[in-house]
Amino acid sequence: MNTENTGGEPGGRKFPFDPFYMVMLFLLLSFLFNSMDNSKSTAPIQITYSQFLDLAESGSLAKVQMNDTQIQITLKSDANAKVVDRILYPQGRDEDQEPAGKDQQYYANRIEDPGLVELLRKHHVDFSGAPAPTVSFLSSLFNMIFPFLILILFYYIVFRVIRKNMGGSGGEGGGLMGGMMGGVGKSKARVYNLEKNTGITFDDVAGQDEAKESLVEMIDFLKDPQKYQKIGATQPKGALLVGPPGTGKTLLARAVAGEAGVVFYHMTGSEFVEMFVGVGASRVRDLFQTAKKSAPCIIFIDEIDAIGSRRNAQLGGNDERDQTLNQLLSEMDGFDSFTGIVVLAATNRPEMLDKALLRPGRFDRRIIVGKPDLPGREAILILHAKKVMLGMDVNLKEIARSTSGATGADLANMINEAALRAVKMGREFVLQEDLMEAVEVVIAGKEKKDRILNPREKRMVAFHEVGHALVSALQKNATPVQKITIVPRTMGTLGYTMSVPEEERYLMTRDELYSQITVLLGGRAAETVEFHTSSTGAANDIEQATKLARNMVTQYGMSDKFGSMGLESPTTQYLDGRNMPTCSEQTNAVVDEEIRQILEDCQQAAIELLKENRESLTRISEYLLEKENITGEQFMKLLAENAEMV
């Protein structure tokens, strides 16, 4: 049987008709034709105006055409070539320079010369105005169309990039715009189904027992909804995970999907919003439509504050974000509680979210994922330590006690830093000293060995740090000292004093807060006692002391002047802890005076303590200068020896 190939290529494959290639082909052909047309004429040679006058006076000119800017020159056919060469090339003509000839065209820039016409008449030169330059049809067409083709080409390339980024193919026969806009409104959610599970369960989450308990009920509802439906209970539609960065909100959401054994859709809030208005709303619709087909399932929206911030009617609002939020509110209200869809979301800024998003029926539960306490930190350390080889002297409880305020991400980083240090030291297992060094690396940075202090600076740093430690040891409400060092670190510290609480504390009394401020100002007090001056090294201490004193006055009601009166409210509780004043400017001025008085009282108390124990301050500081590092046990031993000597 004879088979005819009609495709123009082997196998019947047709040459793809793409506007991009057609535009490029047209530009190439136009450029070639324009170049061929221009090459037909010989380019004229420019000469100076004085050379033009010399040619006129020598009688070598046959015709001159002038316009406002140029003079086009034609030589006589019988002009003396030697005379012309002498005028045009007074230094002699080079090999690459054109010889004078009757067919060669010359031009000169025109200069205002009243005697030019008289000169041309005198030498019988034919002169006239220059005609308009003749341009070929192809050149005219090229000059007219070229800018529009470049513009079309630019937009085509831009939309190809947009289409590629948005994952749309446009389909066959969808046209240029169909191809460019295809897939824009599709959801970008990452899907973890039963075959491709998240691989994470509650066993992989430590230190968040209360948060896990709050999520167990939602998991049980997804696994066995009938027992809840019999009694008339409805499934919570959503849960909002709230907490500081690094506490494990995303990890908890993935663990929920792993425990429930259902399809898990993961998307961040910023992925909904694009450059086109309405794309975010379209992606929300597509996400929920896809989720309904694979119910029961979990939808997890990370960093939901990117689309869930409060709406406002002020000029300049974000229409795209508002439309996306409105669509999300509509979708969460639209699906039935028995469809088996649970929406989880995570944020660091719950105070920024729209009130309609937080009402019951949408995000029914707010689950706090806070920083772990002492048992939680120990559990997290044990979990991550399973992945590394530990030495016999490792005490994770001591590490947990030394890392008050650390998040799960911080603790995981400490374990990894300790393992890296063990490898660097040539060991096959991690020792306690590796873990303690890792704690310091995460808190204060690595040792900065290239920063060398002069003797006076080093002495001042030693007295400063011992001042902190001594004031802490001499007060009954202060935290015990664990380590004192004057080795500079990469995070900007020239030295530091590490204090570790004996037990986890959740409440602080007024006397304990005064003791903390006094300890913070103990370094500045030591500088004052020993050197009768102060340095810039106390900047961070002053910042922390001022913040603590401000909280005492404005939030804790520990001011004699204001009593139990709240003067500030937190705005970013889980990020930087910034507060917003709720009082007048006049009251704020009084608040500042109260803060100053607290700081002054604590500073004076620290100075008095150090003056009473001047010998201990000097002796321990000199020892620190020699050793550079002192443990808490060594410090207390030196303090006790000095007390016996006195």
Image (tube, helix red, strand yellow):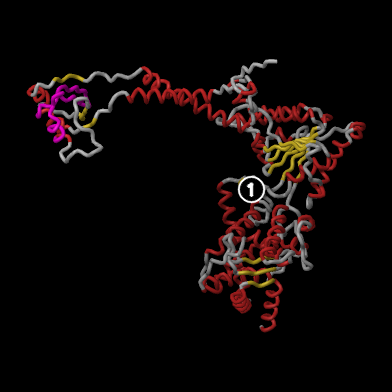
**Looking at the image, which residue is at 21% across and 30% down?**
109
* Above or below 605: residue 103: above
Compared across the picture, whether 21 is left or right of 345 comes to left
* Above or below 418: residue 260: above
Residue reaching furthest to the bottom: 645
In the image, residue 58 lies in the stretch drawn in magenta: yes
Residue type pointed to by label 1 = Glu
**Looking at the image, which residue is at 68% across and 74% down?**
635
Q: Quadrant of the C terminus?
A: bottom right
Q: Nearer the viewer, residue 303 or 200?
A: 200
Q: Quadrant of the N terminus?
A: top right
Disc 1, SS: strand
Q: Quadrant of residue 12?
A: top right
Q: Quadrant of residue 238?
A: top right
Residue 313 seen in render: no
Residue 439 spot, x, y in % from top left: 68, 61
Residue 507 spot, x, y in % from top left: 74, 57
* Magenta stretch, residue numbers: 57-86
* Above or below 240: residue 434: below
| Count of marks placed on residues | 1
In the image, residue 127 lies in the stretch drawn in magenta: no
- Residue bearing the label numbered 1: 568
Near mark 1 (Cα within 10 A), the count class, few <14, some 14-19 or many ≥20, is some
Q: Nearer the viewer, residue 245 or 554?
A: 245
Residue reaching furthest to the front: 1
Q: Nearer the viewer, residue 580 or 484?
A: 484
